Image (spheres, grey):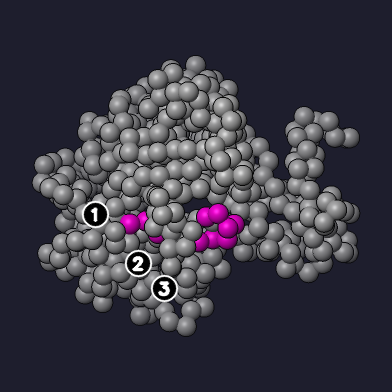
Amino acid sequence: MQHMTVADLLTDAAAEHPDKVALVEAEGRARTWHELDDEVSRVATGLTAAGVIAGHRVMIAAGNRIEFVTAYLGTQRAQAVAVPVNPRSTVEELSRMLADSGAKIVFADVDTVAAVRQALATLETTPRLFVIGGTLNPGEKSYDHLIAMPARSMPAARDAEALATLLYTSGTSGRPRAAMLSHRALLANIEQVGQVRPPMIGGDDVVLGVLPMFHVYGLNAVLGSVLRQHAKLVLMPRFDPEGALDLIEDEACTVVPVAPAVFGHWLPIEHLDERLGPVRVVLSGSAPLAPEVRERFTALSRVPVHQGYGLTEAAPVVTSTLCSVEPAPTSVGAALPGIRIKLVAEGGGTPDAGDAGEIHIAGDNLFSGYWPDGADGPDAQGWWATGDVGFLDAAGDLSLVDRIKELVIVSGFNVYPSEVEELIADVAGVESVAVIGVPDERTGEAVVAYVKGAGPAEDLLDRVTARCRERLARFKQPSRIEIVDELPLTVTGKVQKGRLRAVERRRALSLLEGE
């Protein structure tokens, strides 16, 4: 059978393994492949009855739970466009994404519904809200109401290039934008991952689903691969170091995909090898993992760690050390089957042997540009400039060395300094601001803001802190705000962020006075 959507993979799994458990939640709820397929069809039926037609956008603001999966796949089955968003988004962020996407329907769970209601109140045209669990306000409908109708057959999808999902990322501009991922792109990357040998995920595997499902890594690399392989996915609503290890033991998880920040939480735990007894492989992605952390973890746990490199715009996996013959310590692996990588020097040519260059990628897994008009997508030859800088060795292994764009990756999530800077710049008394990323043992990187302003420093600090807490998702909030008399500037008046990073390196080495 030719698959046109990710939801088609579910149809196959339900036909081949109807009674096999597909999803399990940490709280104990479960669905077999047949039950999951039926519920997804009822979601599609309910969306159609609610007026959703092909191309309409459906926002999903929910944590890792069964209803996230059914809403996502049901939206695809109805030929609508899924818009998964961070359930910890602020009201302002939700308002912006709702307005930008033009969503007709919103799914919200008990943890997100209060913020979603406030965001909906800011819109001129209000989408319909379906609440997953919790108490309803007048005029609202529940998820259970949506799926109450018996499933009806849906018209088969015919266009692989049709838009499947919008995933908000900051792209190359530093402003939040939605990457347009087609059914072709999602399915291509699922197939590319499926061709890796030895396999990342196999049919007999039990996969820990602790990565957020709204993130492309959890959404397509994990859920998509589970659907393709007919494996079992154990959903965990949020990461807790001890709780995750308990769940791994209880459910005998064999594959554990995580972000690099997880290793910092697990390394101090005693008897780590026993706690990870069922695990055959740990997969690390969404940000580089320090070689010394990987080596220490492997020594303590006796579990191999394979890492890769990916981007939302690539749906997401580009490389994996599972594709390498003998990866160097700094390697993020070789390209997956069907993906091409080249390096481009600053002037546009090919770097000299051994020199770094900007990473350009090509493959069927690439996005169609940014919403709504497809801007800044792959060029006419199919190549897309990632904004990342790296080396390619003779064997084709990629090592990351820098970023052209000022991206800060906090626990695997993208934070663009410009977004934080613009917010802080509007605070009363702020004259100038510079935001940088600094190494952090737990989150990989953390956001630090340097602020110059007028008036008492303590008052300015309180105002900036309050504004960030009000307007930014937690992972975007500065971990530290430094009130300074001056910011280092170039002769053209641009902040010299390199000097601020040097200050932070000295701080980390405890070389600053008084430390």
Query: CA gap, disc 3 to disc 1?
Result: 22 Å
Residue 66: say if magenta.
Answer: no
Q: Residue at x 78, y 38 (%)?
A: 502
Residues drawn in magenta: 171-182
User: In the rendered view, does 75 fall on the left or right side of 282?
Assistant: left
Image: 398 above or below 383: above
Residue 181: say if magenta.
Answer: yes
Q: Please tell me which residue lies in front, 63 or 180.
A: 180
User: In the rendered view, does 418 fall on the left or right side of 48?
Assistant: right
Q: Which residue is mark 2?
A: 58
Inspect the image, locate mark 3, and give the three-letter code of the amino acid beneath it: Gly
Q: Please tell me which residue lies in front, 97 or 61.
A: 97
Q: Residue at x 76, y 57 (%)?
A: 433
How far across and down, in percent of the image, does residue 35 sit?
Answer: 17, 51
**Of circles 2 and 1, which is in front?**
1
How far across and down, in percent of the image, does residue 487 sit?
Answer: 84, 52
First reached walking from the N terminus: tag 3 or tag 1: 1
Q: Which residue is mark 3?
A: 102
Image: 75 above or below 306: below
Q: Residue at x 82, y 56 (%)?
A: 492
First reached walking from the N terminus: tag 3 or tag 2: 2
Query: CA gap, disc 3 to disc 2?
Result: 9 Å
